[in-house]
Amino acid sequence: MRFFVGIDDTDTLDADRGTGKLARWLGRRLPEGCRTTGVVRQQLLVDPRIPYTSHNSSACVIIEADEGLQGRIVAAAADILAEHFLVGSDPGLCVAAEVEARRPAVLAFARSCTQRCVSQDEARRAATGIHLTAHGGTPLWQDSCRAVCWPAR
């Protein structure tokens, strides 16, 4: 089974690491029985209303694993974010099985992240039944205009 692990907003302007690096580290620290098949950078909307550090991109780790390993994949990704959390960042995590990631509502939302400013509420609605969590960050992020990362493009 294929899983998509999306992460975003993991760095700050003065950080020595960013979203891509964290995605690659996750790919190397997956639970036994999981295999990384790729790490993809996704360009999100660049807009003055969206706070971002350099290019406003997210990352997606593509993983092959048995269905029963999804919880362990979520835990491994959450551990990476916790271990490398930077004050001032707003890391988010999304883990979806391929069948979930291909739902029309998810694909439409993913496309919209490249074209317009989207909200967390929109993300939550699109992610019904999909793991989507915040891992730190600031209360402002809850209500601000944010582009969110998604694993399916």
Image (cartoon, rainbow, N blue to C red):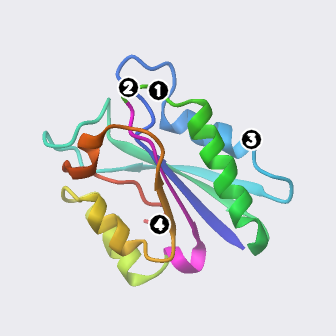
| Label 4 vs label 2, nearer the camera | 2
Position of residue 59 in the picture relative to residue 123 (left or right): right
Q: CA distance from mark 3 to mark 4?
A: 21 Å
Question: Label 1: which residue?
Answer: 86
The answer, for residue 111, to whether it is visible in the render is: no
Identify the residue shown where x is 40% and y is 54%.
149
Q: Which of the two residues, 88 or 1, is positioned nearer the viewer here? A: 88
- In primary-sequence order, the first of circles 3 and 4 is 3
* SS assignment at label 3: helix
- In primary-sequence order, the first of circles 4 and 1 is 1
* Residue 109: quarter of image: bottom left
Name the residue at the right extreme: 32
Crowding at label 1, few (<14), some or many (≥20) Cα neighbours within 10 Å?
Answer: many
Do labels 1 and 2 touch, CB within 8 Å? Answer: yes
Task: Please report the bounds of the magenta region as a residue range.
Answer: 89-101
| Label 3 vs label 1, nearer the camera | 1
Q: CA distance from mark 3 to mark 2?
A: 23 Å
Position of residue 15 in the picture relative to residue 98 (left or right): left
| Label 4 vs label 1, nearer the camera | 1
* SS assignment at label 1: loop
Question: Label 3: which residue?
Answer: 28
* SS assignment at label 4: loop
| Kind of residue sitting beneath label 2 | Thr
Crowding at label 2, few (<14), some or many (≥20) Cα neighbours within 10 Å?
Answer: some
Question: Label 4: which residue?
Answer: 152
| Kind of residue sitting beneath label 3 | Arg
| Kind of residue sitting beneath label 4 | Ala
Do labels 4 and 1 touch, CB within 8 Å? Answer: no
Position of residue 139 in the picture relative to residue 72 (left or right): left
Do labels 3 and 1 touch, CB within 8 Å? Answer: no
